[in-house]
Image: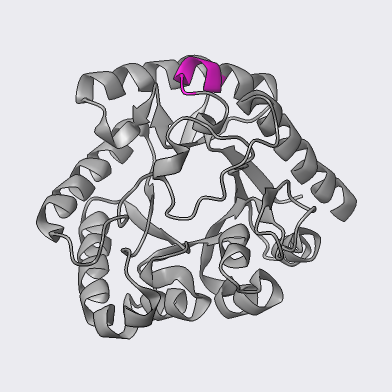
Amino acid sequence: MPFNISMFGDEIAPELETQLRVMSENGVFLLEMRGVDGKPVVDATVAEQAEMKRKLDSYGVSVWSIGSPIGKIEITDDFAPHFEKFKYTCETAHRMGTKRIRAFSFYMPQEKCDEYRSKVIEQVLQMVEYGLSQDVYFCHENEGGIYGQAPERCLDLIEQSQGKMRYVFDAANYICHGYEPFPHAFDMLEKHIDYIHIKDADGASKDICVAGKGNAKYAQMLSRVAKWGSDVTLSLEPHLTVFSGRAALEKDPHLQNTFATGEEAFKAALCALKNIIADLN
């Protein structure tokens, strides 16, 4: 099937060495790089990032995307220092050998999205254009509490960028905030999807679960994706344990411990995804 599998390694363990060992033992050689050795990769020094790249190369693991916190500030916060952070994140992407930065569209009360729309678009486009000038793609993920919580607003951002902004589809994030990921959001955004985060959620409880056990409808979704005619990357983001730094990632993170360890959670998430793909075959 035309799928590549990537992984948020920090959900296995904080230490990069452990992340890479477990991934390689399970045949996953693409990393969505977020937390490394207890802190965000974008907070690491140039020297620390050089050592990270050395370890990546030693395991034959490539970085698919930088799982950055860009855009995870309040829309009323000062944007200037955050833009400088984005510039450093672009440098980080270069050092790690990727052209993708996963990013967001600023926290705000959802009832004020129309009020802040022009400011969101201005700031997002500033980052999109700068990224392109550095040969890096700003890849927007839908998430709760940001401008791009609803699929309609994700589409708005894409259209305002004239397609220059890339899009990361996250079904569980839609479910947890009351939207139907498939077919509603998927139909609306399909032609703009750059890659897909794989985590599922129960629509009633909002609990995160392995793919196929919630309401994401991954079998139907990936059956559609398989017809696109080119390889698509599916990035595992299990959210099945309370891993290091998770509480800071989302305003409403639905924290739970479904598995005893990050390694167990990773293996369960990978197995569930592979079973869905096998059924498609």
Residue at the spot 35% in from the left edge and 69% down from the top edge: 164
Q: Main secondary structure of the magenta part?
A: helix
Residue 195 seen in the current view: yes
Where residue 26 appears, as percent x and y from the top left, is: 70, 24
The stretch drawn in magenta includes residue 181: no
Q: Is residue 111 above or below residue 258?
A: below
Please give left or right for residue 162 compared with residue 65 in the image. left
The stretch drawn in magenta includes residue 17: yes
Quadrant housing residue 176: bottom right
Residue at the spot 21% in from the left edge and 25% down from the top edge: 46
The furthest residue to the bottom? 114
Where residue 12 appears, as percent x and y from the top left, is: 57, 27
Quadrant housing residue 40: top left
The residue closer to the viewer here, 113 or 60, is 113
Magenta span covers which residues?
14-20
Residue 66 seen in the current view: no
Q: Is residue 208 above or below residue 204?
A: above
The residue closer to the viewer here, 184 or 225, is 184
The residue closer to the viewer here, 270 or 256, is 256
